[in-house]
Image: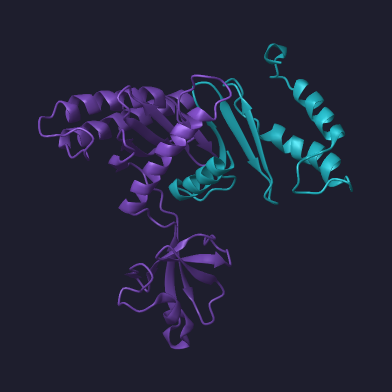
Amino acid sequence: MYGMLFSIRSFVSKMSPLDMKDGFLSFQTSKYRLHYYETPSGLKFVMNTDLSVSNARETLQHIYSNLYVEYIVKNPVCVLGHNLDSELFSSRLDAFIRALPYYSPRAA
Amino acid sequence: MVIFSVYVVNKAGGLIYQYDNYVPRAEAEKTFSFPLDLVLKHHDEKVIVSFGQRDGIRVGHAVLSINGVDVMGKNTGEGKDILEYLRDANNYPVSIRFGRARLSSNEKLMLASMFHSLFAIGSQLSPDVGSSGIEMLETDVFKLHCFQTLTGIKFIVLADPRQSGIDTLLRKIYEIYSDFALKNPFYSLEMPIRCELFDQNLKGALEVAEKAGNFGAGS
């Protein structure tokens, strides 16, 4: 997946008829939609949803600023760059996703 | 509310047709005096801006012409190396035009093949079974729509993100392809499309889609 996203980003920057500000946002196939958000520090947030979700960029931005920064970056035990090991992060992330308006308990 | 370009890719991933409907050329021409406050570098046979964004000249823009003479790759129109030319104070004041680099045919071929592979990987990454390839790719500046026929031909359209009715346009392009390319006895399958009627009808269909798109989304 990382290679795919890297290729898509480079493809989009060459193909684009105008100068881009945010870059690649999402792509969709007949079954799913992949949303992408990259922070200025190079961290990539990817979310796969079904086709009804059109814009998850704010969701991903919220996950970054309110969950990742709070529970991983500010955690002295978590080494940035390694696998995210914080249980608190996982449980808060789970609760946040379940609270999203487009999350359906059927899928769980 | 525009359609930027149309690409047609064959079964093997090779580009067989390409048409640029609208190419927005954001260019900036400025006169500079020594020393140049932009940092330029070589990249892919072109000279591009690496640092020093200002006044419409963005990072990534390429040098298009110097003193009105179009550049040829890394060299000026006369054959001198651009960076050497700009390092010499005697050549100033100089007027340079910067802009987004135009894609050469080779680059378009490469990008089409790249998309062909990305399309295939998109179907494999699917969390659900039986997914098609990438049907739509969205960025903040354009939306890329792709329609794959049962025979493996892909019709790719790059349009404004707010443009509507692209699905119908893709089906229409497929119809035009089957009418004017496939039924042409001189056209061989999977080869580059060189049929005048195909070009004409395609342009007509794009105009119709752009006008219809205006009613659909409003402005």
Residue A72 pos. (x, y %): 83, 42
| Residue B219 in view (yes/no) | no
Question: Left or right of A36: which side holds B114?
Answer: left
Q: Residue furthest bottom?
A: B90
Against A91, is A68 above or below?
below
Figure disc tally: 0
Residue A65 pos. (x, y %): 78, 41
- Name the image quarter holding the N terminus of chain B: top left
Q: Residue furthest right?
A: A76
Residue B64 pos. (x, y %): 39, 65
Tell me what residue is drawn at x 81 percent, y 24 percent. Answer: A95
Tell me what residue is drawn at x 35 percent, y 69 percent. Answer: B71
Question: Left or right of B214: which side holds A108?
Answer: right
Residue B182 pos. (x, y %): 18, 27
Question: Left or right of B150: which side holds A81?
Answer: right
Displayed quadrant of residue B85: bottom left
Displayed quadrant of residue A93: top right
Chain letter, cyan in picture: A
Colour given to chain B in the rendered image: purple
* Nearer to the camera, B31 or B117: B117
| Residue B90 in view (yes/no) | yes
